[in-house]
Image (cartoon, rainbow, N blue to C red):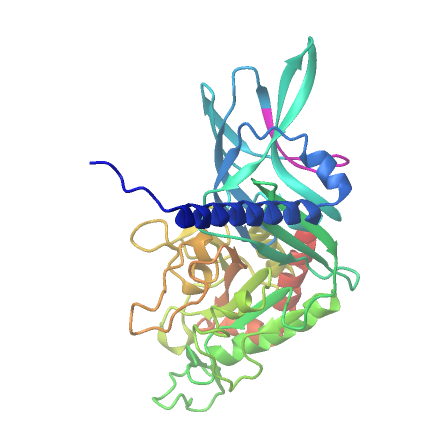
Amino acid sequence: MSRKKLSKKTRKRRLIVKIIFVLILFVICFSMFLLFSKKDRAFLENLNYDQSGEITYYDIYGIHMNFNGKFELDDNFNNPKLVLANGNKEEVIDWNLEHQDNNYSFETSEYINGGINLEKLENGKYYLLIKAETKKDDATVYEYFPFTNQTEYDDLTYYTLTKNNSNKKIDISWGHYLTYELLSFNIENAKLPDDVYDITIDPGHDGNDSGKIVCSDVSVPDDMGECMSGTSYKESDLNFTVSKALKEELEKLGYKVKLTRDSKTDTVPTYGEMGSATTANTTKSKFNFALHHNSTNIPGGMSSTYGLEVYVAGDSNFDLAKLLVQNVCKYGNTSTSTKDEFKVKDGIYQRFSDDGITPYYYMIREVGGIATHAYVDGNNEEYDANPYYNSNHTAEGYLLELGYIDNVRELQNILDNPKGYARGIASALDDYLN
């Protein structure tokens, strides 16, 4: 069957549509071209666009950014490196690289809190590229290849920690040079927005949830939380006392700090936009410390278990955790916990759900988004949704059990020295960053 011949008017209309489409595409490409500086264009026009890598995963966890990806290189290329480059400056990024024949796969770190340290990047605009060696006229030359985005995620904006009353803004953007996709880092000095913080602190429990209640006279509190003759102490109040002291210590060091609650009687939801598990990410903070005090439920202050426990996410390096243990023990006049369950190193603990991967404590799991396998998406009617469960830009979280308040001797040390515990945490973070 022969196709019906189009009328002259219809052919003309279709031709006009095609011309308009081409013109629109040209305008878009030309506009994108003009977005780049003359220096950028000179660098980008010399990239090798015949082949490119693929980014299959990326996130920011705390102060570090991680990438997973893959690429293929022709036989005439070797010794590939991952670089941030702009033609004038270039920084080689560490990666774990594997390959079979010409097919490569990589990750920038085996740890969720490793990878590119965003705090150390210098001002300027850079591009994430593959750099590989090849031979031309018997001389070694280098060519650069861009990446395409094969994830569901798009641009990110990161604000550095406050240092000497100043900050930097890092715009990490997927853009196009002509028709080619590439990833850029634009780094410049910027004032920290009012709603962005460096560090968040969650004083565990709240005005509606006291946690454990203990008595100074080693009696057992009654159903109303009252003691026979001694003073009753609520875990929620002790958590707040140390948290407030920690905020003051960190602010002395120049950091901008937010508590998830501002008094002993305040209540705070778990999720939502400003919950105990979400404030860190709503405010784009880099570190979140959840402070608690432990108990064994042995009545009358007679527990023999004592000591500090620092809980960390899986696939973490322990650099900061070790400093937290060391400095809190030093300034808090305490020691590491005597509990063996969940211990991976002295004072450092990891507790997982049944799958052995997902962190048990929501103050680690839900704060960390995709890096820590957060999953509270609102499908369970018992909980509000965590709006950041699927986020790839989250805070690095630690849960500290500062001591056992049903151990009467440890309780007294906690009551006598809350500022020591706070100083230990603050000095550990400062040592880690500096």
Query: Residue 202: where, in percent of width, then height?
Result: 53, 71
In the rendered image, the vertical position of residue 139 relative to residue 73, given as above or below = above
The magenta stretch is 80-92
Q: Is residue 271 visible?
A: yes
In the rendered image, the vertical position of residue 94 relative to residue 350, given as above or below = above
In the rendered image, the vertical position of residue 104 relative to residue 14, given as above or below = above
Task: Tell me where residue 177 sits by quadrant.
Answer: top right
**5 or 353, nearer to the observer:** 5
In the rendered image, the vertical position of residue 224 relative to residue 320, given as above or below = below
Q: Which secondary structure dominates the residues rendered in magenta?
A: strand
Give the residue displayed 78% in from the left and 64% down from the top. Answer: 165
Residue 55 left/right relative to 120: left
**192 or 347, nearer to the observer:** 192
**200 or 154, nearer to the observer:** 154
Query: Residue 228: where, in percent of width, then height?
Result: 41, 91
Query: Residue 379: where, in percent of width, then height?
Result: 30, 67
Q: Is residue 155 magenta?
A: no
Q: Is residue 113 visible?
A: no
Query: Residue 58: where, in percent of width, then height?
Result: 51, 46
In the rendered image, which quarter contains the N terminus?
A: top left
Residue 322 left/right relative to 388: right
Specify the farthest residue to the left. Answer: 1
- Count of all numbered marks drawn on residues in the image: 0
Specify the farthest residue to the right. Answer: 164
Residue 267 left/right relative to 242: left
Residue 415 left/right relative to 165: left
Specify the farthest residue to the front. Answer: 8
Give the residue displayed 44% in from the left and 74% down from the top. Answer: 272
